[in-house]
Image: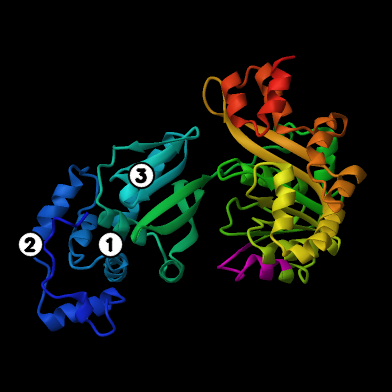
Amino acid sequence: MYRDLPLPTFSVADAPGGRPRTAKDARALMAQRGHTPSAPKRQSTAALRGQFSHEVPMIIREMAEKIPYQFMGSDRVLFASEQVQRLPAVDRQDMREFFHRVVRHMLTLGASDIDLGGTSSRGSIWLRIHGEKRPIHQFGMFTPDEFTVLILNLLNDKSRVVLEEHRSSDFSFSLPIEGDRQVRFRASAYYEMDQLALNMRAITDSVRPLKSLDLHPQIERGLMFRHVRDGLTIIAGVTGSGKSTTLDAIIDANNKDFAGHIVVLGQPIEYMHQSHRCIVRHREVGRDVMSFKQGITQSLRQDPDIVVIGEMRDPQTISATLEITDSGHKVFTTLHTSSAVESIDRIIAEYPTDEQDRVRGRLADVLRCVIAQKLAPRVGGGRVMTKEVLSLDSSARAAIKSDNASEIYQMMWEGGAQGMTTLEQDLFRLLKQGLITVETAVNYANNKKRLNQLLRR
């Protein structure tokens, strides 16, 4: 991108220890050599911009222009970070208000996600609307450096440190919209080829009723603490499949149904539940507790009835989840998998071969239910949830313990009376209701052979 800009006459290899490690080191070397940024940088940045909206605060462009063209890669981000922290409060507020306008526009379009930054965005802000990602141009075009400045201005000191150390930083973002009402977002700032990028997902400020998930009454009953006071329930699905929405519906239903204590662990915390019949504690990983594993262990001393674990993402969290479920608590969590069978296989595969038999036994004893879901395009617009549901009975437990997880699909296929269904059966149900097309059903099926059997009936 900066190939057309004049290069410095010194070699970074001349620096002590080789290439400057930080923007500060590079500036020191430049001062030593007597080099300063030259005028062509401003012309080149304007050429890269192409066009821009007058609504973009001038300070964003000015800050981007100040990044010395000699700096390459992540040194540009480090320099920009230092400069943003030194800005007067009024300039930082101007940038925040611009970003607020962008986000409010996102909400008016019904978008779920916003993406920006890095070369891959091609200078545009992108939105996901009804499942489809597309660029919008109402707010103009940006250079990667301008996106970097805009993103850095959203981060607090702790998030900036995490970003520099781990090349990614997850955080929550709140936008006031009317009165005391706020919309919350789950955000992730990260590096893409040495440039900063950002994704933000809107968190709904309302909870769906549990009934709206269209689960069998027997499955609903098992999700409620009043009826089943222990065991592990997994909500599975890929990114953007509505796992958090389902989890929040379950939390809300229990919160209004019995008098107890719910501990929610998340990274970040998304929907904030108001305490109703339950006291609902929210603990954000990286903010209130250092890790999911620590949060799970600490919750044992906090007198919980239900523990909600945002995601089982590593062996340590999986082990801690099984341990707290072993202790007799009711636990809900999510897993980044696309089917019930894959969820079971994924958990077991996280352990060394010599430990897998033991884990199979533990998982079979504590697992109560797996709901694996997807969001499919709805006829007429929007999306509709399709799901696979496994309810653990003695046969399914035996299949897990004997390493015959492949038999579980057939159990779901034949388990309609117990509230179970395969994804293919649920897609066929939606198809008969006219909510999805045949093409959508085929595209979203995990087992296309079984779906074709249903279609030929």
| Magenta residues (range) | 283-296
Mark 3, residue position: 102
When asked about the image quadrant of residue 218, the answer is top right
Hey, what amino acid is under mark 1? Val
Q: Position of residue 351 (x, y in %)?
A: 72, 63
Q: Of the residues under marks 3 and 2, which one precedes in the sequence? A: 2
Say what secondary structure mark 2 lies in. loop
Residue 90 is tagged as 1
Check the image and name the residue furthest to the front: 353
Cα separation between marks 3 and 1 = 19 Å
Q: Residue at x 41, y 63 (%)?
A: 155
Mark 2, residue position: 39
Give the label, 3 or 2, closer to the camera. Answer: 2
Query: Is 449 positioned to the left or the right of 130 in the image?
Result: right
Is residue 212 or residue 381 the one in the foreground?
A: 381
Is residue 291 or residue 261 the one in the foreground?
A: 291
Say what secondary structure mark 3 lies in. helix
Hey, what amino acid is under mark 3? Val
Q: Of the residues under marks 2 and 1, which one precedes in the sequence? A: 2
Look at the image and say whether residue 290 sits in the magenta stretch. Answer: yes
The residue carrying pointer 1 sits among few (fewer than 14), some (14 to 19) or many (20 or more) residues within 10 Å by Cα, namely few
Q: Where is residue 51 in the image (x, y as percent from the top left)?
A: 18, 42
